[in-house]
């Protein structure tokens, strides 16, 4: 367990035991979980059956949000709840 950290960063986390693990560029703050229908999974540009979003290329090129992190969970069909996931 970690003590509460002040929102911000980037921080470095070092875990020492028989060996040392070093994690860098860690941010502390709000976490949002988004889920829903197919529009939650759409790309900005042309892909699949959706029309590209207006001015998406300019929006991507001008975006400057280095502290936003995105983790996308890969789809996996299951009849039971799963305890593990794959994503990037």
Image (cartoon, rainbow, N blue to C red):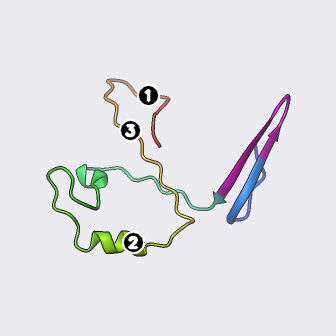
Our reading of the magenta stretch's main secondary structure is: strand
Residue that mark 2 sits on: 61
Q: Which mark is residue 50?
A: none
Residue 5, horizontal then vertical, whole percent: 74, 59
**What is the magenta range?**
14-26
The mark lying in front, picked from 2 and 3, is 2
Callout 2 environment at 10 Å: few (<14), some (14 to 19), or many (20+)?
A: few
Task: Find residue 82 and name its label.
Answer: 1
Q: Earlier in the sequence, mark 2 or mark 1?
A: 2
Residue at point 73% right, 58% down?
11
> Compared with residue 13, is residue 82 higher up or lower down, i.e. above or below?
above
Task: Please name the residue shown 69% across and 62% down the image.
Answer: 10
Which circle's residue, 1 or 3, is located before the other in the chain? 3
Work out which residue is located at the far top of the displayed protein and give it: 79
**Residue in front for this viewpoint, 38 or 54:** 54
From the viewer's perspective, is the residue at label 2 or at label 1 nearer? 2
Residue pictured at 44% horizontal, 28% vertical:
82
SS of the residue under disc 2: helix
Label 3: which secondary element: loop
Q: In this view, does 60 lie above or below 38?
A: below
Q: Which of marks 2 and 3 is nearer the N terminus?
A: 2
The location of residue 79, given as percent across then percent down, is 32, 24
Residue marked by disc 3: 74
- Classify residue 66 as left or right of residue 55: right
> Is residue 84 part of the magenta span, yes or no?
no
Query: Does the magenta portion include 16?
Result: yes
Q: Is residue 56 left or right of residue 13?
A: left
Would you say 79 lies left or right of 19 here? left
The percent coordinates of residue 48 (x first, y second) are 18, 49
Q: Distance between the residues labelled 2 and 1?
A: 37 Å
Q: Split into 4 quadrants, where in the image is the N terminus? A: top right
Q: Distance between the residues labelled 1 and 3?
A: 13 Å
């Amino acid at each position: 367990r970690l003590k509460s950290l002040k929102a911000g960063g980037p921080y470095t986390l070092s875990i020492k035991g028989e060996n040392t693990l070093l994690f860098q560029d860690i941010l502390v703050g709000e976490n949002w979980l988004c889920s829903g229908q197919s529009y939650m999974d759409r790309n900005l540009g042309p892909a699949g059956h959706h029309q590209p979003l207006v001015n998406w290329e300019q929006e991507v090129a001008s975006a400057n949000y280095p502290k936003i992190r995105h983790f996308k969970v890969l789809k996996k069909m299951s009849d039971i709840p799963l305890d593990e996931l794959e994503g990037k």
